[in-house]
Image (cartoon, rainbow, N blue to C red):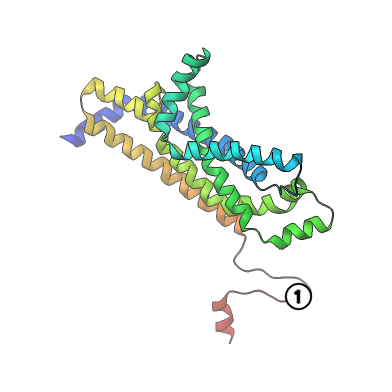
Amino acid sequence: MSSEWIVQIASQNWKSFLNGAEMTLYISLIGTIIGSIIGMLIGVIRTIPKGEKGPKKIFLTIINAILNAYVEFFRGTPMIVQAMVIYYGSDLAFGIDMDRTFAAIFIVSINTGAYMAEIVRGGIISIDKGQFEAAQAIGMNHIQTMINVVLPQVIRNILPATGNEFVINIKDTSVLNVIGVTELYFTTKSIAGNNFRYFESFFITCIVYFIMTFTITRILRFVEKKLDGPENYNMTGNQMQVQKPEDALKKA
């Protein structure tokens, strides 16, 4: 029976499944962090005011064109194709023999960076323009405004999207098996090739992927709630007390 095979395969290969899951989490976590940093930098650069005519405007126009090309290319091509081109192309074109794990992190990072760049740019644009004007009025430049005023709000606003990218990366690391990275999918394919029980082997992998994504999602939601703070709060002194609507109705 399939259930007996599932138990047998899991008991015999649990270390391999665990190692594959560990590699998957490692690549997706590091790739998401680096990609978020890339996206943050690109988002800040792409929102720098170009100003009037002059060298600054020309320079920013060129930089924006390059960044736009990067974003459009990596958002418009599959990660599996990017993996093949970058890993094998770097060796053929430049003679660089990349380590597979390094290549995997690099590929996930630049892919995530392209998506995060648009997410960050949208988060920056969503901030009220009055805050930019107020920061300029007290003498802040663009970088100071971003660091002290805008980015703290943007980071909170894009946290759900960032968590979603992390979950997507956990699943999308499976495509890295094409360059021989020993993540969870590659490990499962090797196990199934040895025992010829493909359904049972990949059923176990399906459960492992679900456990990882479900756990990460719940952790991120917990963090979001912590950042939101309490639903109601009391202010000291003669300031007004903020209550839940249902509490106000009860007192009425």
Residue at horizontal 37 percent and vertical 38 percent from the top: 209
Lateral position of residue 17 relative to residue 23, left or right: left
Find residue 40 and report its image quarter.
Answer: top right
Dot 1 falls on a residue whose secondary structure is loop
* Viewer-closest of 205 and 250: 205
In the drawing, does residue 199 fall left or right of residue 110?
left
Residue found at the far top of this picture? 95
Relative height, residue 177 to residue 77 (above, below): above
Residue projecting furthest to the left: 1
Image quarter hosting the C terminus? bottom right
As shown in the figure, which amino acid type bears the numbered disc 1? Gln
* Residue at figure coordinates x 70%, y 38% from the top left: 59
Query: Could you tell me residue 191's position as x and y percent?
Result: 29, 23
| Rendering quarter of residue 79 | top left
Q: Residue at 30% of width from left, 30% of height from top?
A: 10
Q: Would residue 138 be visible to someone looking at this image?
A: yes
In the rendering, at what x and y percent does residue 62 appear?
65, 37
Image coordinates for residue 35, horizontal then vertical, percent: 56, 37
Image side of residue 49 versus residue 91, left or right: right
The residue that appears at 47% across and 24% down in the rendered structure is 86
* Residue 113 visible, this angle: no
Judge by depth and name the residue closer to the eye, 189 or 78.
Answer: 78
Quadrant of the image for the N terminus? top left
Q: Residue furthest right?
A: 139
Q: Name the residue under label 1.
A: 239
> Quarter of the image holding residue 42?
top right
Residue furthest toward the front? 53
Q: Position of residue 70 (x, y in %)?
A: 54, 36
